[in-house]
Amino acid sequence: MKETTTTYYNNINTSTSCRRKMWFIYVCDEREKVLGRQQAPGSCPHCGGKVEAMDVEIQWRFCFLPMCFKLKRKYFCTLCARRLELYY
């Protein structure tokens, strides 16, 4: 199981009349966890390689609090490693 994390920091400096500095840190975090992989039907339109489907769990966090939870299926080619999109 592979897990990737992307973190975004935004620091804002605000000064008051007492010359105190106050720092606000907003942290947005996106975690992707691979749940499984399986071969998908069809072939890559670019190179003709096999297509693989990957089930991914995506979790968005704001200040370490979970905000959104999604399950997605992503398709990619095993030869050229391109991300493929499914059109109906």
Image (cartoon, helix red, strand yellow):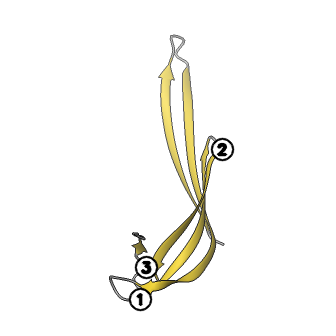
Q: Which mark is residue 88?
A: none
* Residue lying at the far front of the rendered structure: 88
Q: In the structure shown, which secondary structural element does the residue marked by tag 3 occupy?
A: loop
Pick the front one: 57 or 10: 57
Describe residue 67's horizontal placement relative to residue 82 as left or right: right
Q: State the residue at coordinates (48%, 28%).
A: 13
The residue where tag 1 is placed is: 49
Under circle 2, the secondary element is: loop
Q: Position of residue 20 (x, y in %)?
A: 55, 19
Q: Quadrant of the C terminus?
A: bottom left
Out of 79 and 39, give the one closest to the viewer: 39
The 10 Å Cα crowd at callout 2, few under 14, some 14 to 19, many 20 or more, is few
Residue that badge 2 annotates: 64
Residue 83 picture location, percent across and down: 42, 72
As displayed, is residue 10 above or below residue 2? Answer: above
At a point 56% along the width and 24% down the height, the residue shown is 22
| Amino acid under disc 3 | Ala
Query: Given the image, on which type of amino acid does mark 2 rest?
Result: Phe
For the residue pair 30 and 12, the one nearer the viewer reads as: 30
Instruction: Give the mark nearest the N terminus, 2 or 1.
Output: 1
Q: How far is disc 3 from disc 1 in space, using C-alphas?
A: 9 Å
Image quadrant of residue 34?
bottom right
Residue identifier under label 3: 81
Label 1 sits on a secondary structure element that is loop
- Write the residue at 34% across / 82% down: 45
Residue 43 falls left or right of residue 29? left
- Report whether 86 appears left or right of 3: left
